[in-house]
Image (cartoon, rainbow, N blue to C red):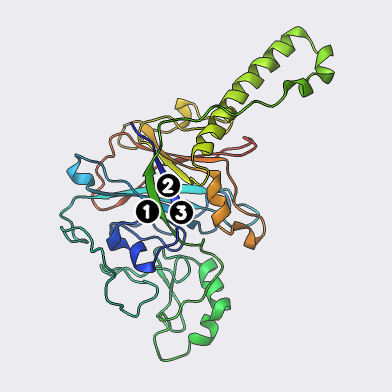
Amino acid sequence: MAVELGFVEAAPAWRLRSEQFPSKVGGRPAWLGEAGLPGPAELACARCGRPLAFLLQLYAPLPGRADAFHRGLFLFCCRAPPCCAGLRVFRNQLPRENDFYSHEPPAEEPPPETGEPVRLQLLSGPRLCRVCGCLGPKTCSGCHRAHYCSRDHQTLDWRAGHRQACGQAENSDNTVPDHNFLFPEFEIVIETEDEITPEVLEREDESEVTGSMAEAPEEELDSMAKHESTEDKIFQKFKTKVALEPEQVLRYGRGIAPVWISGESIPREEDIPDCPCGAKRIFEFQVMPQLLNHLEADRLGRSVDWGVLAVFTCADSCGLGAGYAEEFVWAQDVSAAGCP
């Protein structure tokens, strides 16, 4: 199977709306199905309990599957210092004939402007949080117009200007300030990876690692040499793949093997939970560390960080109606020191 690579590009706002079926980074989610969205509890960090930030979504339909004619994967991460560790990913799929979208492909031209800079209500009715664009079941007790996913985001919006807008007669949803919570928004453009690989980069001079090793036991030296050799091969493979397309932020290949950055903290089969339907989960895509360069992630203090984020999804892509099913994401740190 050919590997597909994702690259970020600036795009007009209309191209990143739900009806265009975008793959994108940052901003608010462009939800696919409008029913069964994950709620605040599902989009809370499992470690610190704070609301997760939308990181990216990938439009990934399955050819030959009528029930997955439209299919999207939505990845969220914690960006609340000092945690910045939680991760959750959700899958949604729809047949071509559905309650939300036309049977015909989306228009190639921008639609007439509606004067709605931020969509805070789904066409099917549910209100969205003014800060993050996820379900907003909480309502401001003052104006009863502003909706939020959590107390955290209500407080953030209050400080960012809703304090002044709350008592005004006009709809306070018309203008949404920058809350410094969302990641910068980009379109993800997909290209097929060139199968011609460059020569493997030269290995660093190994003479530097002699030194104190001379006095180590022979068994220990053998073990260290084997570990260094395996580690070197894995990292060299990663560097080679990156060298092909240094700007890649995503690698997609359903059912292939991920390209790990280190030999440490690679998940075993038993580390990847089966889907609740009983099927195994298989690798589908990975987020590369190059994406961090585009996120402005350090403006809140300690930033999000990773070496590889590998997403595993149900091998059967089981039927969900119009709901969102949680899948599994494994984080391999640059230091390979920890995983979720």
Spatial distance from mark 2 to mark 3, Cα to Cα?
7 Å
Q: Earlier in the sequence, mark 1 or mark 2?
A: 2
Spatial distance from mark 3 to mark 1, Cα to Cα?
10 Å
Checking the image for residue 8, the label placed there is 3
| Residue plotted at (55% across, 47% down) | 290
Crowd band around label 3 with a 10 angstrom C-alpha radius: few (<14), some (14–19), many (20+): many
Amino acid tagged 3: Val
Query: What is the quadrant of the N terminus in the image?
Result: top left
Closer to the observer: label 3 or label 1?
A: 3
Q: Pointers 2 and 3 in contact (CB under 8 A)?
A: yes
Q: Pointers 3 and 1 in contact (CB under 8 A)?
A: no
Residue 210 at x, y percent in the picture: 79, 18
Checking the image for residue 23, the label placed there is 1
Residue 182 at x, y percent in the picture: 51, 63
Judged from this view, the residue extending furthest toward the top is 218
- Is residue 154 in view? yes
Q: Identify the secondary structure beneath mark 3.
A: strand
| Residue plotted at (40% across, 81% down) | 174
Q: Is residue 135 left or right of residue 340?
A: left
Q: Does residue 220 sit above or below 29 in this rendering?
A: above
Amino acid tagged 2: Gly
Q: Is residue 257 left or right of residue 152?
A: left
Judged from this view, the residue extending furthest toward the bottom is 169
